[in-house]
Image (cartoon, rainbow, N blue to C red):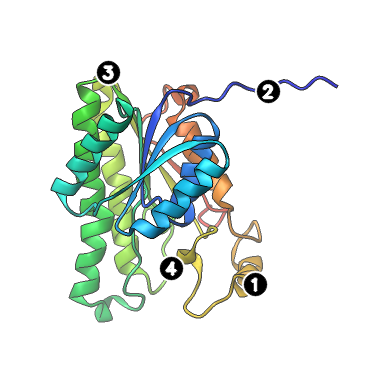
Amino acid sequence: MHTTTLAPRFTGKTVLVTGGGTGLGRAIALAFAAEGANVVVAGRRAAPLDETVALVEGAGGTAVALTADVSSGEEVRELVRATVERFGGLDIAVNNAGVFRGGGPVADLSREDWQTLLDINVTGVLLSLQAQVAHMRANGGGAIVNISSNLGAHLRIPGVAGYAVTKAAVSALTRAAALDHIAEGIRINAVSPGASDSEMSLLPGESEAERAERMKQQSPLGRISSGAEVAAAVLYLASDAAGSVVGTDLVVDGGSSA
């Protein structure tokens, strides 16, 4: 039986993924590399990034690791410069770096946890966008996908106020930036995952098996989303097939916020 293989969608493209050392960032990097992209994975710790690069190269792809703290405008600008220097351009950026801090009631959220959430989840996305857009607007455009969350603009649950506020901000920032920069040929969208195959979706002390049992009750779908499922949404929004998709916030959460 003859099977038709689709041409890779991202051959010759350069993709930057922040928070690329673990979880969804790693899954997204692997997915882009599998479809022909040159991938730069960035994060604060070198070891997990090197593991992602090894996985990409083991699968026949091309990737490099660069350390950067997204809460530093200088480091993010250097990250974009180094990406362009290494591969000759920057076509697609995925702003995935994020943290979870300070579970508990609003009244008990520490100023330190609040500030960390804002610095990385909101300011980090803003600074990343600014550096990426600065390159793309001068080089014919590009596509940017911000990783938000179903918690925030789409769903509220007790005990995660700080995180939800920052992710609601990412959803709003995505739409504002999309309108500001589409005329320059830069398409900006967001993906908002629910509980997915990453450490962030585990409760303190919870095993993956215990999480699976919990999700049977909590998710309409009855399970977490796989990294590949979230990555598929990101790749669609970054692809030419989504050429008229601007400022959307694609929720991938098994129906939890429906």
Q: Nearer the viewer, mark 4 or mark 3?
A: 3
1 or 46, nearer to the observer: 46
Residue lying farthest to the left in this orientation: 74
Please name the residue shown 62% across and 75% down the image.
210
Q: Amino acid at mark 4?
A: Ile
User: What amino acid type should be assigned to the residue bearing mark 3?
Assistant: Gly
Cα–Cα span, label 2 and label 4: 43 Å
Which kind of residue does numbered mark 2 sit on?
Thr
- Residue 69 in the image: above or below residue 243: below
Q: Pointer 1: what residue?
A: 209
CA gap, disc 3 and disc 1 = 47 Å
Picture quadrant of residue 98: bottom left
Q: Nearer the viewer, mark 3 or mark 2?
A: 2
Residue at the (47%, 39%) spot, across then down: 234
Give the image location of residue 117, x and y in percent. Answer: 26, 63
Badge 2 density bin: few <14, some 14–19, many ≥20, Cα 10 Å? few
Disc 4 marks which residue? Answer: 157
Left or right side of 187 for 201: right
**Residue behind mark 3:** 140
